[in-house]
């Protein structure tokens, strides 16, 4: 019973993390006209929704019920406020996006540390590697623009 609760709770937490990721990248798309960043952000938004759908069969909540985290909501509010007042540099946008991906990867690592059924572990591992790939692409893109 405890393992089932832990598993469902972990999956719900991942869904919330993916909601945070989706909301964050959706917000960042409008803060820059950089096509490369907009493309990777759009991909991350779409990917988050697909990954959520895969996880829902292990959850007792819908993606909407899982919501977003208070800390992520606060961070998005602060970034949007700052952007409206002073503008946001591309470098700052990249840094924030990389933080989001790091936090997402950390959430995945935490649930992978649980005793998971093999099908769920395989699913989450596959999702982890997709997000890790996006994280690496994002860091390379940031380096490319910071060197320019």
Image (spheres, helix red, strand yellow):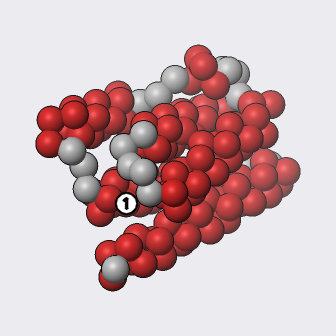
Residue nearest the viewer, comparing 121 with 18: 18
Q: Is residue 81 left or right of residue 70?
A: left
Residue 5 position by quadrant:
top right
Q: Which residue is mark 1?
A: 94
Image check: 101 left or right of 99?
right
Find the residue positioned furthest to the right.
119
Residue 129 vs 51, above or below: the answer is below
Q: Residues within 10 Å of mark 1 (few under 14, many from 20)?
A: many
- Between 70 and 138, the one lying in front of the other is 138
Where in the figure is residue 100, as x and y percent of width and height? 43, 51
Q: What is the number of callouts on the image?
A: 1
Image point 48% across, 76% down: which residue? 140
Q: Is residue 105 visible?
A: no
Q: Quadrant of the N terminus?
A: top right
For the question of whether residue 18 can be seen, the reply is yes
Horizontal relation, residue 6 to residue 69: left or right: right
Query: How far from the left and from the top, in percent, is residue 104?
Result: 50, 51
Q: Position of residue 10 (x, y in %)?
A: 59, 39
Q: Quadrant of the C terminus?
A: bottom left
Q: Residue at x 71, y 28 (%)?
A: 59
Depth check: give the residue in front, 101 or 119: 101
The residue depicted at 67 percent of the width and 65 percent of the height is: 129
Q: Residue at coordinates 56% horizontally, 24% vertically from top-left? A: 66
Instruction: In the rendered view, tell whether residue 8 sits above or below residue 148.
Output: above
SS at mark 1 in the image? helix
Q: Quadrant of residue 48?
A: top right
Q: Residue furthest top?
A: 65
Apparent side of residue 103 relative to residue 53 in the rendered image (left or right): left
Among all residues in the image, which is located at the extreme bottom? Answer: 147
């Amino acid at each position: 019973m405890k393992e089932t609760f832990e598993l469902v709770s972990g999956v719900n937490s991942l869904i919330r993390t993916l909601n945070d990721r989706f909301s964050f990248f959706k917000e960042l798309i409008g803060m820059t006209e950089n096509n490369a960043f907009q493309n990777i952000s759009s991909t991350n938004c779409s990917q988050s929704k697909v990954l959520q759908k895969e996880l829902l069969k292990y959850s007792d909540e819908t993606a909407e019920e899982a919501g977003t985290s208070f800390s992520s909501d606060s961070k998005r509010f602060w970034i949007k406020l700052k952007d409206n007042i002073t503008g946001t540099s591309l470098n700052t946008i990249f840094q924030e996006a990389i933080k989001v991906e790091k936090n997402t990867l950390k959430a995945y690592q935490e649930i992978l540390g649980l005793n998971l059924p093999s099908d769920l572990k395989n699913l989450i591992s596959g999702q982890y590697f997709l997000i890790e790939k996006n994280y690496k692409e994002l860091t390379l893109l940031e380096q490319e623009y910071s060197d320019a």
